[in-house]
Image (spheres, rainbow, N blue to C red):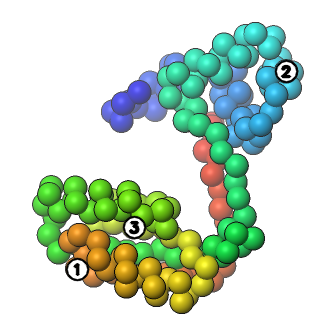
Amino acid sequence: MNESTTTADFSERLDRIDLKILRVLQNDGRISNLKLAEAVALSPTAVLARVQRLTREGFIAGYQARLDPHKLGRGLLVFVEVLLDRTTPNVFDAFKAAVQAHEAIMECHMVAGGFDYLLKTRMADMAAYREFAGTVLWQLPGVRETRTYAVMEEVKHETRLPLG
């Protein structure tokens, strides 16, 4: 599936049972094939074939456990706006490559507006973030300016996509 695929393309390729399978799997990625078949009122063989097709076609990108960052010493959530000194393809490429190398950077999004990238990080505390900012963030290629937003309260965190 490529990025130019439109929402209309999805609706033509996914029927109501496919969408129901995706909804159930978003809520419980560890559900057994038998329970999934019961939930969508199909045979286990038919459900398995659909899940395999949905995976093959890229609608299901993978499965992972959601971990509690607080219990694992990563309770401080920090968003960072990054403004680059130049917006040329080679600066973008160097920045993107450098970001990929740092596991403390959980997400990186190129955005339109007053800055170039929005980063999401999780740290143990503000001292750990200060260390990260000095040794990693401000050393990334092309960084001219950053703005940091430490999250005081995570009001909503949702990973499930709305499926109509």
Q: Secondary structure at mark 1?
A: strand
Q: Name the disc covering residue 144, or none.
A: 1
Residue 31 in sight from this viewpoint: yes
Q: Name the disc covering residue 118, or none.
A: 3
Q: Residues within 10 Å of mark 1 (few under 14, many from 20)?
A: few
CA distance separating discs 2 and 3: 41 Å
- Going 67% across and 31% down the picture, which residue do you hit? 22
Image location of residue 72, percent across then percent down: 70, 69
- Find disc 2 in the rendering and name its residue: 34
Q: Earlier in the sequence, mark 2 or mark 3?
A: 2
Q: Name the disc covering residue 112, or none.
A: none
Disc tally is 3
The C terminus lies in which quarter of the figure? top right
On screen, residue 151 versus residue 26, left or right, reads left
CA distance separating discs 1 and 3: 14 Å
**Along the viewing direction, whichever of 65 and 10 lies nearer the viewer:** 65
Comparing marks 2 and 3, which lies closer to the viewer? Answer: 2
Residue 83 in sight from this viewpoint: no
- Going 46% across and 65% down the picture, which residue do you hit? 105
On screen, residue 62 versus residue 103, left or right, reads right
Image location of residue 158, percent across then percent down: 65, 56
- In this view, 122 is above or below 58: below
CA distance separating discs 2 and 1: 54 Å
- In this view, 5 is above or below 154: above
Image location of residue 18, percent across then percent down: 65, 22
**Amino acid, disc 1:** Arg
On screen, residue 119 versus residue 116, left or right, reads right
Quarter of the image where one finds residue 44: top right
Q: Earlier in the sequence, mark 1 or mark 3?
A: 3
Q: Secondary structure at mark 2?
A: helix
